[in-house]
Image (cartoon, rainbow, N blue to C red):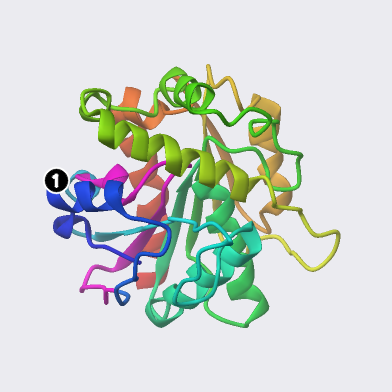
Amino acid sequence: MVHRTRDITKDTAATAGRATAGSPQRGVVRGGTAPLRLFCFHHAGGSAWSFAGWGRRLGPGIEVLPVSLLPRPASVPGPSGPVGTMDDLVREVAQRLAPVLDEPYAFYGHSMGALVAYCVAQRCLAAGRRPPACFVAGAHRAPHLPAPGLTTDLSDAATLDLLLGLGGAGRLLRENPRRMQAAVDRLRQDLLVSATYRHPAHGHRPLPCPVHVLHGSDDPLVPAAHAAAWNRHAAGHFSLRIMPGGHFFHKEHQGLFFGELIRALRTAGNDHQR
């Protein structure tokens, strides 16, 4: 499911928070006339609402298209089959994005979203489709490195502590117990799905586009060396920017974050207009 950011309202956010694992998916939204489409993949426990306002911050040259990642438990069937593993999730997302990857585009993924975006990009390469013009990863280790053990205790209390401790719950969620519970449930499901990822020993190749990595200096989950290790997955230009803040540095220092993102995307957009 893909949204334009101008279509994301508080009602959309509430709907996303209430969505169940078997909710029907709407069709992919066609992009507009902007030179570059930016597909945004949200963090574990997040939703398309995570990217509300990004279109305004990035300007008219970039169309922001948030991608909903609502993995479903394997026991609940859906329109494209059950999604209980990272492979299942990536396959479904890649299928839904395929019709709108025919023009220049870029990927931004935050935390778990960076891993999903990377896997979708790899599927594009394997299928001989257009690769992204730019790949930006935030708050995630390089995909070949082992994941931290976050799924050993998935009680409501432990999941809520993780969500609040990392700064992933805004004021509106904290003030609404029902939405907070929905976010906790999504986070737990996302962590279980993410834990199923196994980096293949063969088959993946470095991305043939600029790769930019943004890392929070105080991120408790991602050491700086693990963020820097993304250079292994870049065939060409690679950059690592250490940002002040924790796992959700993009919320803590929005001016710095959007400045870095705009610089990366403008370079990609200019390359494709020549």
Residue 63 location in percent, x, y?
26, 62
> Quarter-wise, where is residue 128 in the image?
bottom right
Residue stretch in magenta: 29-53
Tell me, yes or no, whether the highlighted magenta stretch contains residue 246.
no
> Quarter-wise, where is residue 21 in the image?
bottom left
Q: Is residue 120 visible?
A: no
Tell me, yes or no, whether the highlighted magenta stretch contains residue 43.
yes
Residue 30 location in percent, x, y?
27, 77
Residue bearing mark 1:
10
Q: Is residue 139 left or right of residue 272?
A: right
Give the residue displayed 75% in from the left and 41% down from the top: 145
* Extreme residue in the front direction: 75
Q: Amino acid at mark 1?
A: Lys
> Quarter-wise, where is residue 201 in the image?
bottom right
Q: Is residue 252 left or right of residue 166?
A: left
Which is nearer the eye, 268 or 30?
30
* Extreme residue in the right direction: 201
Q: Quadrant of the N terminus?
A: bottom left
Vertical position of residue 149 compared to residue 104: above or below: above
Which is nearer the eye, 209 or 164?
164
